[in-house]
Image (cartoon, helix red, strand yellow):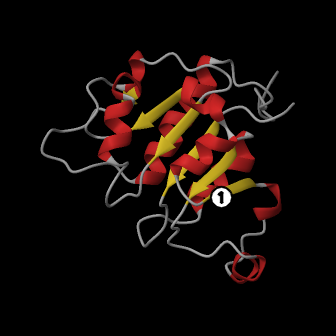
Amino acid sequence: MGEMVRRAEYRAGGAGDPAELRQYCPDLRCRLHLIRPLGFDISDRAVKRAGLDYWHLVHVADYEDLDALFAQHPEAKDDLWLATTKAPRDYTQARFSPDCWLFFGKETAGLPEAFRLAHYDRCLRLPMREEARSLNLSNSVAILTYEALRQNGFPGLCGTGEMKNL
């Protein structure tokens, strides 16, 4: 079985964007699309130095900007969802397709306003206290990705653990 959800990180990186974000991809059969500039190095040397022994399982592509991503993947505009604290509705109102694209912004800045406004009806937020700033990006990625997979029956993922049929 191929990939399911495609995850795009806009200008990812920095102290608030740890490697576990990219670890979700091989675990969940998701493809990772990175939009530059990045706050981390994805060269083979840097990946080996960081001890990311699962990196060979990550299907990663990187792009100079959002326009470059959409030029290579025009289908993404037809089935995308944007994670933002500024969204008018929460993620439980979304109906994710098996081939959807989830867009996440840099933890400290989010997605560009023009991009959010162009896709206003596709913006989602995770409910939280009004006075809070935002959830950790890694947690947001996990919540939305698992919800998209849940809505589609967790295709290609193990449905039971070793305790089945005890």
Count of numbered tags: 1
Identity of the residue drawn at 53% across and 37% down: 102
Identity of the residue drawn at 21% across and 51% down: 133
| Residue 38 relative to residue 109: left or right | right
Judge the density around disc 1: few (<14), some (14-19), many (≥20) Cα neighbours within 10 Å: some
Q: Position of residue 165 (x, y in %)?
A: 82, 21
Residue 88 against residue 95 in the figure, above or below: below
Nearer the observer, 69 or 104 = 69
| Residue 1 relative to residue 69: left or right | right
Report whether residue 58 is seen: yes
The residue at which mark 1 appears reads as 62
Q: Position of residue 146 (x, y in %)?
A: 57, 33
Residue furthest left in the image: 131
Kind of residue at disc 1: Asp
Q: In the picture, which quadrant includes the C terminus?
A: top right
Q: Position of residue 94 (x, y in %)?
A: 45, 18
- Give the quarter of the image for residue 21: bottom right
Q: In the picture, which quadrant includes the N terminus?
A: top right
Identity of the residue drawn at 50% across and 41% down: 103
| Residue 39 relative to residue 93: left or right | right
Q: Position of residue 8 (x, y in %)?
A: 57, 46
Report whether residue 79 is seen: no
